[in-house]
Image (cartoon, grey):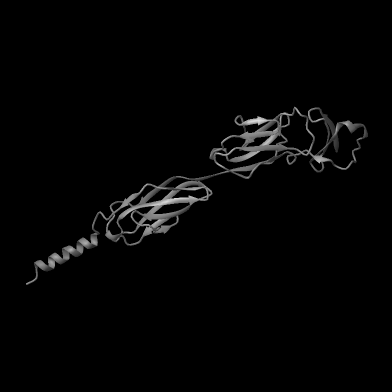
């Protein structure tokens, strides 16, 4: 069944077709010539409004999001903006545009727009991505206690960046990297491995290094103690 009604805000005649769940629009000026069998005009459904913007913006830059429609809208139309389904109250809203100054990573998310009074005709979400250099680079020594000779030692590096950073490992007083990846391991640690280690996180927007972590042998493995005691015992009882 087809029903019609006039929406004064949009100055359009709306025809709703229950059979295909589409909503069609046509200029109300031509209402007297309207026929229910007319070729469908522009669809004013959830896909009519579209948010257009840059897909990725570097942190600190400014960006403009535009809400476009295939239907002609009055000049005084009020637009509403949403981020992650929540109505926005921040940013500069002017006509059909949302302006974000000096964006941060917190501005990233899914953005949508709608016309005031017709919030149910909201646009599809468009993801706005904020890219930034690595920060908060930290090294963690994965050890349950005192490091003894022969132990396996693993260092882990964490960072916050977008896109994800590449990780390189360094030992102080050595010019070249000693490893790469999220973690760095030494399977059989001894005194020659002792030193201060740090990681460096890098993407195309910048880099940051962590503080150094001291890794040294601080104990003797119990097997070595047993071997030492065994040698002493042998020397004591040697005729």
Q: Nearer the viewer, residue 165 or 19?
A: 165
- Percent x, y of residue 56: 60, 45
- Percent x, y of residue 13: 84, 33
Quadrant, the C terminus: bottom left
Q: Left or right: 95 with respect to 148?
A: right
Q: Residue at x 82, y 30 (%)?
A: 11
Q: Left or right: 32 with respect to 162?
A: right
- Total labels: the figure holds 0
Quadrant, the N terminus: top right
The answer to which image quadrant residue 148 occupies is bottom left
In this view, the residue farthest toward the bottom is 239
- Percent x, y of residue 123: 70, 39
- Percent x, y of residue 205: 52, 47
Q: Nearer the viewer, residue 128 or 102?
A: 102
The answer to which image quadrant residue 110 occupies is top right
The answer to which image quadrant residue 124 occupies is top right
Q: Is 18 situated above or below 140?
A: above
Q: Residue at x 81, y 27 (%)?
A: 8
């Amino acid at each position: 069944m087809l029903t019609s009604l006039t929406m004064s805000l949009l100055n359009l005649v709306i025809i709703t077709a229950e059979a295909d769940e589409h909503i069609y629009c046509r200029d109300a000026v031509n209402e007297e010539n309207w026929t229910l069998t007319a070729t469908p005009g522009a669809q004013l459904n959830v896909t009519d409004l579209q948010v257009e913007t840059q897909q990725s913006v570097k942190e600190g830059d400014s960006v403009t999001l535009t809400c476009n429609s295939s239907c002609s809208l009055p000049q005084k139309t009020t637009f509403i903006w949403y981020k992650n389904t929540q109505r926005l109250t921040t940013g500069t809203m002017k006509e059909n545009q949302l302006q974000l100054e000096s964006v941060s990573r917190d501005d990233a998310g899914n953005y949508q727009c709608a016309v005031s009074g017709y919030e149910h005709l909201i646009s599809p979400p468009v993801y706005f991505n904020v890219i930034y250099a690595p920060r908060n680079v930290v090294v963690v020594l994965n050890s349950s206690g005192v490091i003894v000779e022969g132990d396996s030692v693993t260092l882990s590096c964490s960072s916050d960046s977008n896109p994800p950073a590449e990780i390189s490992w360094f030992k102080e007083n050595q010019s070249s990297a000693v490893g790469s990846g999220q973690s760095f391991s030494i399977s059989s640690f001894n005194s020659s491995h002792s030193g201060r280690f740090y990681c460096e996180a890098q993407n195309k927007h910048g880099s940051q290094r962590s503080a150094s972590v001291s890794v040294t042998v601080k104990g003797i493995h119990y097997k070595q103690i047993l071997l030492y005691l065994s040698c002493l015992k042998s020397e004591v009882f040697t005729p």
